[in-house]
Amino acid sequence: MPQISVQEFERLPLRVHSFLADVPLHDVWEVDLPRTRGGIALTDFLRATGGRMFAPTSPVRALMRLRYFVGRCFHWDDDAPSPAGPRQTFADRLTAADREHSLAPAGERDGPFRVVYRFENEQLVELVNRTAHAAASSFLVEMPTSYRFYFAVYVRSVGKLTPLYMALIDPFRKLVVYPSLLRSVRTTWNRTMAGR
């Protein structure tokens, strides 16, 4: 699954560009999906999958279990405020129009993430802990002969640990986790959207 340029991603008409303009864009990925019919929105895909577009493989699940084990040992994921102060949420940035148009309430659980907003073809979820404040943007666009699913990761530092933590996990994210998750998006799409 290819990573794409920041420039290509920034040309897309997305709310996230202005919403997280001050947060570093860590990387962007895309996967092309077969066109089974026209007019499929991201929300249609989410509804068809019960909100489970991603299906982690055994190696990815093992890496996640290891990460959460280490996190428990070092209290990275505790709900208590970090030494840097109370945790912030990107949901604090939502405008009244954002909240009105979002199809899911801010703060709703989405696996280990929390929803910031969910529009018809764009979703933003976040994860806040003592290692980083990360956000993942998903976007589905209809192309002439296919659909294209974009997945972008933003990372805001929460302290001195963030750069070291990201450097340590980047090889696993880029070589194992995200390629596997995006392949699973295509598999899930083929299973749930084919013939609908």
Image (tube, rainbow, N blue to C red):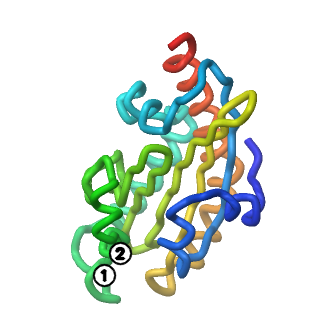
Mark nearer the N terminus (2 vs 1): 1
Of helix, strand and loop, which one carries label 2?
Answer: helix
Q: Quadrant of residue 96?
A: bottom left
User: Crowdedness of circle 1 by 10 Å Cα count: few (<14), some, many (20+)?
Assistant: some
Q: Which residue is at 35% across, 29% downward?
A: 50
Q: Nearer the viewer, residue 33 or 154?
A: 33
What is the distance, in whole Å, between disc 2 and disc 1 at their CAs? 21 Å
Pointers 2 and 1 in contact (CB under 8 A)?
no
Q: Which residue is at 39% across, 55% downward?
A: 69
Q: Which residue is labeled 1 in the image?
A: 82
Does 133 appear above or below 150?
Answer: below
Does 150 appear above or below 164?
Answer: above
Q: Which residue is farthest top?
A: 195
Q: Which residue is labeled 2 in the image?
A: 93
Which numbered disc, 2 or 1, marks the residue closer to the eye?
Answer: 2
Q: Position of residue 68 (x, y in %)?
A: 40, 55
On the question of residue 170 being in view, the answer is yes
Q: Position of residue 89 (x, y in %)?
A: 33, 72
Does 57 appear above or below 158?
Answer: above
Q: How many marks?
A: 2
User: Crowdedness of circle 2 by 10 Å Cα count: few (<14), some, many (20+)?
Assistant: few
Q: Quadrant of residue 92?
A: bottom left
